[in-house]
Image: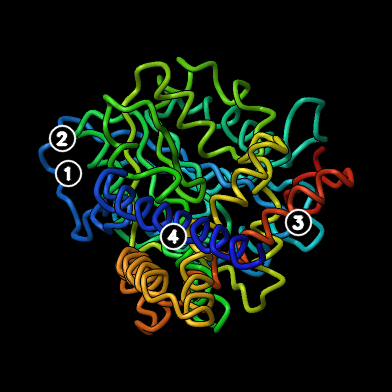
Amino acid sequence: EKAMVLAEMEQVLLGLMVLSLGTWLFLLLFWGQFWRVDQLLNPTTPTTNNFTSLPKICIIIPARNEADFVAITIKSLLLQDYPGEVNVFLVDDQSRDGTADFAKEAAYAVGRVNQLKVVTGGDLPTGWTGKIWAMEQGVQKALELNPDYFLFTDADIKHHISNLGQLVHKAKTEGLDLVSIMVKLRCESFWEKLLIPAFVFFFQKLYPFAWVNNPKKSIAAAAGGCVLIRKQTLEKIGGLKTISHALIDDCSLAKAVKSQGGRIWLGLSSLTVSLRPYNSLETIWNMVARSAYTQLSYSPLLLMGSVLGMVIVYILPVMGIIIGLAINNVLICFLGLITWLLMSFAYLPIITFYQCPLWFAGCLPLIALLYTLMTVDSAYRHWQGKGGSWKGRAYL
């Protein structure tokens, strides 16, 4: 009887191994080629000479306690080579570290004081999350200048000198309502090299960029660190008030635009970079746990499904190799090895993009385990009433 039970368990494991392998074959062949790093903003400086008129741009930066990075961000934006009119609105969201003063000093240092407007943020009203409320206050001030586009960006990003020109060129020449890039995240410490490329990889798998950029597909996403949107488009969807409660503001904004028939584009950039360091496991853990359960719509069923899916797709192949060796089952070992090689192959392009050692591609099962634990912790925090947070504010 014991032998029969073991034989049945072996058959179940074999079935799960086949399922894992089949899942990866499906993802690689039929899931929007998400693993390819081919949706990139043109790294060359585009020409705007053929434009009959240059769009007026208002840049909105929500900033709360960003003294460490805001000066670099402000300088990079004020020194853009875009020849059209550009104004920067920094919304100082009740910072306690002199964020606004650092921003003003940066503008003075590059001789562009008149292009920087500092907006003092008001108290957070009911029904708004902190970041979107800060963005909304910037938009209301910027509307006085009647811009053609808004650029929403974070206060910890160094923009390549041609970034704004590239974004505008992309939007104008392709008739896009929203253009967004996932800026290149910092990837210097061990934990950054281990986990940051995977963060982008999982995002690409959740929102295949080729499908996001396909107007025939309903899937929509954006990266909040850099989003260019037409003023008319923002007005058409009802303004930021439409997504006032959203913790994942970027994807919510993109969904609102695409659902109204707007055309969007999302890609990667190797030249515009995030300055924020993630030197420890704890900092990355908190970043993911902040919104992972939100992404699952606070659903326990989706959480269980997500955990089960991560185990079967990422962790089971390595477990299968170990168990297969222990029970001397060559087929289970073979299936596990092939599946592990396939996922490593899929992970390799983003590892190469981030210039990490190639052996990190084989670490995806371990990385997936850590991200699964972060997701579970995100749910646990929500159940404790801590919810998501942005710059010290918590939301249930």
Residue drawn at (70%, 55%) of the image: 289
Colour setting: rainbow
Q: Amino acid at mark 3?
A: Asp
Reading the image, the residue beneath label 3 is 377
Tell me if 251 is positioned left or right of 289 in this view: left
Per the image, label 1 sits on a secondary structure element best described as: loop
Query: Of discs 1 and 3, which sits in the foreground?
Result: 3
Q: Quadrant of the C terminus?
A: top right
Residue drawn at (75%, 56%) of the image: 377
Disc 2/disc 3 C-alpha distance (Å): 50 Å
Q: Which callout, 1 or 3, points at the residue further toward the start of the chain? A: 1
Q: Quadrant of the N terminus?
A: bottom right
Per the image, label 4 sits on a secondary structure element best described as: helix
Q: Residues within 10 Å of mark 2 (few under 14, many from 20)?
A: few
Residue 185 % position (x, y): 47, 66
Per the image, label 2 sits on a secondary structure element best described as: loop
Checking the image for residue 48, the label placed there is 1
Residue 2 % position (x, y): 66, 66
Residue drawn at (28%, 53%) of the image: 28
The reply to whether discs 2 and 1 touch (Cβ–Cβ < 8 Å) is: yes
Disc 2/disc 4 C-alpha distance (Å): 56 Å
Per the image, label 3 sits on a secondary structure element best described as: helix
Q: Amino acid at mark 4?
A: Met
Query: Of discs 3 and 4, which sits in the foreground?
Result: 4
Disc 1/disc 3 C-alpha distance (Å): 48 Å
Residue 213 % position (x, y): 29, 36
Reading the image, the residue beneath label 4 is 17
Q: Amino acid at mark 1?
A: Thr
Q: Which callout, 2 or 3, points at the residue further toward the start of the chain? A: 2
